Amino acid sequence: MHSFLRVVAAGVLLTLLAAAGCAEGRTEARPTAGVPETSPPAPVPLTPQVAESAFRAYVTDEDVARSAGDERLALTWTSDGQSQLTAAEFRKAAYDGDPVQRFVYGKPKLYVPKLKDAAYPQWFVVSVDRSVLGKDKSKRRTLMGFILRGPSDHWKLTLATLLQEKAKEPKVAIDADGYATALSTDDPSMLIRPRDVGGIQATIAAEGPRSVAAKVMKSSAVTTGFYQDAKRDRKKAKKKDLTLQVVYTATPFPYFGLRTEHGGGLVIYSLFRNTSLVAKDPDTPKPEIPQEAEHLLDGTVEGNEVDTTATLHFAAYDPPKAKKNATQPKAHMIADDGAVTKAATPPVKKQP
């Protein structure tokens, strides 16, 4: 920035000197300093063709990184929660002494919203069959969200989640030009505002089937099931004189909403699950490191506490508000995936 200012200042000075020379009757040419003009790359409008090219490039680049076991390269093609999950996956593979898994993709369905040409971030969603290379019967329908944050950036996978075995993927509405329709964050035609879907799920996970939130979202393994899991795990911890706390929270990561046929919505988003296992009594043995977090720690518990954070990716179907006197269907979960991405064993806090 300072060098730019110096160049501009020099140009102004030379212009003033040239003017002074002319005033004195001098006719010789005076040099002028030019500042090269630079402009950011022109925005490329998001089209289904652009999205398909970006997806194909990602598939190729991802496999190059995974086949080489190159975590740093793999992380250049991801962002947000998917970066956290990818880093944890590479670390677990190294801990177990296994190669990181590679994927084989089927024919994708691309859901490309019609966005303003100069607006960023750009994004699109892909629905595709994905299998683990070398593993028979591993094929799962996967929903993947891609994002481009600016004209100088490149497309990155921000989240991926797996369709549940018995779930039906809602049909995203596609217009004659091949575009989907993005839902606004507070779309009033939806039963749940798209931005609140994750909060409703987190509330049910915390409060259980009697929660007010359960009136608008169906019971499932990742709603009331999360509540029951935490309740059971707290009882197990208590028998060992340990205290377990489980909290689901929002993330700062992007979420995506797409209009489905018949007025509903497909909402794809992330949550954090934070757990804290504490031995409050000094005579109680230190808590053991959970198996799902072993690869993130060095095998020792320094203090009397083990904390973990899981990054979880979900997709839900958000129905339209029912017309007057009609039965209102509930929202329901259709996809989930995730893993523990952070763990810590903080030292005992010193009392003041």
Image (spheres, rainbow, N blue to C red):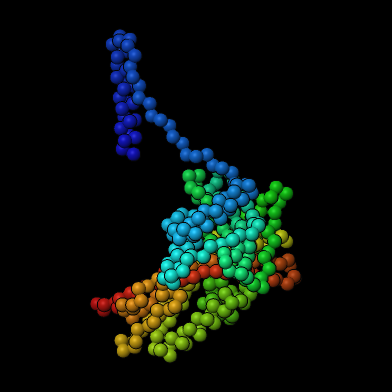
Does 25 sit above or below residue 185? above
Instruction: Pinpoint residue 125: horizontal percent, then vertical percent.
Output: 60, 57
Instruction: Pinpoint residue 6: horizontal percent, then vertical percent.
Output: 30, 32
Evaluate whether residue 76 shows in this view: yes
Image quarter hosting the N terminus: top left
Does 350 sit above or below residue 16? below
**How many labels were placed on the picture?**
0
Instruction: Pinpoint residue 302: horizontal percent, then vertical percent.
Output: 31, 77
Tell which residue pokes out farthest to the right in this image.
325
Picture residue at 46% right of the left edge, 84% below the top: 234
Picture residue at 29% right of the left edge, 14% below the top: 21
Does 31 sit above or below residue 8? above
Q: Nearer the viewer, residue 188 or 102?
A: 102
Q: Nearer the viewer, residue 62 or 222?
A: 62
Is 305 left or right of 92, judged from the image as shown?
left
Picture residue at 48% right of the left edge, 47% below the top: 153
Image quarter hosting the C terminus: bottom left
Tell which residue pokes out farthest to the bottom in this image.
239
Does 160 sit above or below residue 278? above
Picture residue at 66% right of the left edge, 70% below the top: 167
The quarter of the displayed image where residue 10 is located:
top left
Evaluate whether residue 19 shows in this view: no
Instruction: Pinpoint residue 128: horizontal percent, then vertical percent.
Output: 63, 60
Tell which residue pokes out farthest to the front in this image.
134
